[in-house]
Structures are given as C-alpha cells and as structure tokens.
Image (spheres, helix red, strand yellow):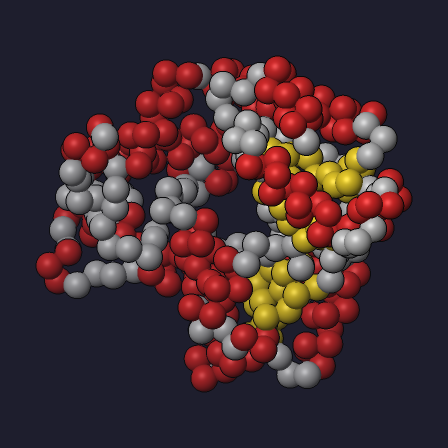
Amino acid sequence: MLSNGFNVVGFNWIASSAATELENIVMDWLGKMLMLPKSFLFSGGGGGVMQGTTCEAMLCTLTATRDQTLSQIRRENIGKLVVYASNQTHFALKKASQIAGINPMNFRVITTTKSTAFELSPKALRSAILSDIEAGLVPLFLCATVGTTSSTAVDPLGPLCDVAKDYGIWVKDPNALIKALSTNPEYLRNKATESKQVVDYKDWQMALSKWFRAMKLWLVLRSCGISNLRNLIRSHINMAKHFEELIGMAKRFEVVEPRHFAMVCFRVSASTMGKDEKYCSSNELNGKLLESSNASRRVYMSHAMIGGVYVIRFAVGATLTNYGHVTMALKVV
C-alpha cells in the first residue's frame, strides 16, 4: 500500500531517483545476504533489478543471451539456437524461450532419474550439446536449478557450468541485458542518463515503467533484520525435517526424495496397500489421499509427478507455522 501510494513512474533515474537509488541499495543488501561475489553487486561494478515475476527474469536473460549470440552468428540464424533444461525445470523457461523466438523444436529437455536424485547430469548435457553441434545447431542457454519446483532437486552447478563454459553457452557480459533491452528515444534523453553514472531500470526489464518494489524489500529488511529472516528460514527447514522424520517412522508412507529445503515429497507406499485398495493404482490412491486431506481444511498440500510417480508435497513456508501444525498435518494425513 505504501509503495503504491507513492505512485512513482520509475522508468529512469530522472523520473524517480529515490526509487532507483533505493533499489540499488536493497539489491546490494540482498546480494550480500545471498553471499554473492562482489562483482554481482552495484558496489562491485555489477548490479541487479527486481523483476515482476520469475518468468520475466527468465525472458530478460534469454533475450540478452539471444541478442549477444546473434550479433556473432547473424540474426537470420535464430532458428539454430538451442536451449537446454531438465525435465524438472519449471515450465516457465519453455514459455520464455518461445516468446524470445527460440524454435520449440530446439528446446532440449534432458531426462533425469531417481538414481541421481533427479539432478541434471553434466554428462547427459555434454552429449546433447555435441549432438546439436554435429547437426549444425548453436547451443545458447542452460537453465540449472537449485531446488526444483516438483522435488527440490539441486543441479550440480559447478560441473554444469564447466560444460557450458566449454561451448560458450554461459553469458558473462554484464552489459548484455542493457544492450538487449535498451530504449533511448529523444523524449527519454536527459543529462543524468547521458552521464552513464546512474541506472535507468527501463533498460533492465521488459516493461518501460516500474513499481516501487524496493520499498517493500527495504521495509522487510529494516523491520525484521537479516538474522531474523535467516532464523525464520532455518525454522521452516527444521520443521520440514521433523515432518520427514515423522513420515519415516510411519509404516504406510515413504519419503520419495531426500529433503533439501523446507519441502517433503512423500506418498503412500505401494507395498503397503491393503486388499480393499488394490482396485486403484498407487498414483490414484495418493491422489485421493491428497484430495481428502485438503478437504479437511486443516492442511493444504499440493502434488507433483516425479518420474511417473504421484507424490504429495508438504511445504513449510507460513510465518506462523509451528511444530504443533506439523504434527497435526501428519495426523490429518
């Protein structure tokens, strides 16, 4: 409400210097919280922008990558560009790829398996890249994930980035995004922009204008503090760990994938299905369990299909959740 009340039109620094400068500050704060290298921060020559959604962020990154690559291989070769992801990657990447003009046939979905905890295999990635190069295609973009939506799988970032680096997939030019999205008609020109000493966020995002989102993050960080936020996240992770332990002790259930963060993927084990339950498949039974659990209105969970297996996802993320709620959730299930 407060950020909307200011009603800023923050497309460039001269239009709302306060919104721009505050976003510079809180993005550096966030970068330090995440322990990013100094080169990622404004104070280290980098910088960040608060996008409206993850989809927008993906599209901006793809657009910058696409334009940088096409400047080297000529624009008429856009049909040769290839994007790589795993079958655990969020579907928003495929949508962003299509909007960016990538041929849907060149969107590579690399299969992951339970034996590797559904991580994207560097070996499989390299094999896919080599096959595309032999076919005359151009590897463009790799999306690795830390905590996939369906199973919280964590891709091996180091080895994957090594493979990407070997084939020039990863874009390291910090100016690539600005070059791809820059708009500078006469009516937007001003001394501040021309000085190159300020940030015009219109060149860092898809939209021209910008909400005062930095105010929201500033208020959260100033009122809660980094330590309290970290403690809240650790508390959620510990409660998820407790639920995982409770599920492990229950004979009828199994944890499908090891818990990484604050989400537990579990299901009724097929081996424990009773005679009266054999009329339906294991997936159908778990679907009915989720439906009835949510119908109780005491707990709300979601599901995912992982390797053809229906799993129930128990996620801890509410501010007021406590261990009593976790225990109650298991009783409901």
Question: In this view of the protein, which residue sits in the foreground, 171 or 242?
Answer: 242
Residue 257: x %, y % from top left: 76, 41
Which residue: 43% across, 28% down? 29
Which residue: 54% across, 75% down? 104
| Image side of residue 198 versus residue 6, left or right | right
Which residue: 37% across, 16% down? 223
Q: Residue furthest left?
A: 187
Which residue: 77% across, 29% down? 247
Question: In this view of the protein, which residue sits in the foreground, 133 or 88?
Answer: 88
| Image side of residue 79 versus residue 156, left or right | left
Residue 80: x %, y % from top left: 56, 80
Question: In this view of the protein, which residue sits in the foreground, 209 or 31?
Answer: 209
Q: Which image quarter: residue 244?
A: top right
Q: Quadrant of the N terminus?
A: top left
Residue 62: x %, y % from top left: 47, 62
| 10 over 94 or under it: above or below | above
| 65 over 227 or under it: above or below | below
Q: Quadrant of the C terminus?
A: top right
Residue 196 visible in rendering: no
Residue 30 visible in rendering: yes
| Image side of residue 243 versus residue 275, left or right | left
Q: Which image quarter: residue 49?
A: top left
Question: In this view of the protein, which residue sits in the foreground, 310 or 139?
Answer: 310
| Image side of residue 150 versus residue 225, left or right | right
Residue 212: x %, y % from top left: 25, 37
